[in-house]
Image: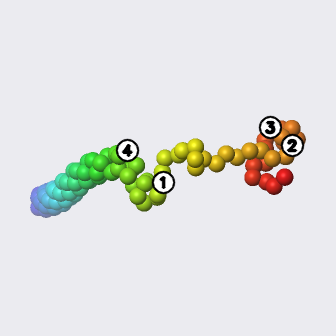
C-alpha cells in the first residue's frame, strides 16, 4: 500500500510541476503575442503616416516645381526641339536608320 501511495504522490507532484510549466509557457506566449500585436499596430500607424506623406510629396504641382528648380527642366518648344534624321541607305538596314552618323 505504501508503494502505491508513493507512486500516486509522485504522479500528483509531476502533474503539478507540468501544469506550472505549461502555465508559465502559456503566459510567456501571450505576452509575446501582445508585443507582436502592439508592434503590428505601430507599423500600421507608421505606414499610414508614410502613405499620406508620399501622397503629399507626389502631387503634380510639387513634381513640376521640383523638376523646374532642381533638374532645371522646362517645357518643350519648337525653338529648342532637335530632330534626328536618318543618314545612309535605309533600304540596306531593313527599315532601321543610322542616326547621328556622319555621311
Circles 3, 4 touching at the beta carbon (< 8 Å): no
Pinpoint residue 51: horizontal percent, then vertical percent: 30, 48
Q: Which residue is mark 3?
A: 95
Is 4 left or right of 36, judged from the image as shown? Answer: left
Instruction: Name which of mark 3 and mark 1 comes first in the sequence.
Output: 1
Q: Disc 3 vs disc 1: which is toward the camera?
A: 1
Instruction: Name which of mark 2 and mark 4 comes first in the sequence.
Output: 4
Spatial CA distance of label 1 from label 4 is: 14 Å
Label of residue 89 in the image:
2
Label 2 sits on a secondary structure element that is: loop
Circles 2, 4 touching at the beta carbon (< 8 Å): no
Residue at 53% from the left image edge and 46% from the top image edge: 76
Spatial CA distance of label 3 from label 1 is: 33 Å
Label 4 sits on a secondary structure element that is: helix
Pinpoint residue 92: horizontal percent, then vertical percent: 88, 41
Q: Which residue is mark 4?
A: 60
Is 70 left or right of 12, judged from the image as shown? Answer: right
Q: Disc 1 vs disc 4: which is toward the camera?
A: 1
Spatial CA distance of label 2 from label 4 is: 44 Å
Mark 3, other Cα within 10 Å: few <14 / some 14–19 / many ≥20: few
Label 1 sits on a secondary structure element that is: loop
Q: Which residue is mark 1?
A: 73
Instruction: Name which of mark 2 and mark 1 comes first in the sequence.
Output: 1
Amino acid at each position: 500500500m505504501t508503494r502505491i501511495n508513493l507512486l500516486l504522490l509522485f504522479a500528483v507532484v509531476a502533474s503539478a510541476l507540468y501544469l506550472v510549466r505549461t502555465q508559465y509557457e502559456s503566459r510567456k506566449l501571450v505576452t509575446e503575442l501582445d508585443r507582436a500585436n502592439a508592434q503590428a499596430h505601430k507599423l500600421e500607424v507608421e505606414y499610414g503616416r508614410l502613405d499620406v506623406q508620399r501622397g503629399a510629396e507626389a502631387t503634380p504641382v510639387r513634381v513640376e516645381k521640383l523638376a523646374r528648380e532642381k533638374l532645371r527642366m522646362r517645357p518643350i518648344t519648337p525653338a529648342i526641339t532637335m530632330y534626328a534624321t536618318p543618314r545612309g541607305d535605309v533600304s540596306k538596314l531593313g527599315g532601321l536608320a543610322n542616326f547621328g552618323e556622319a555621311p
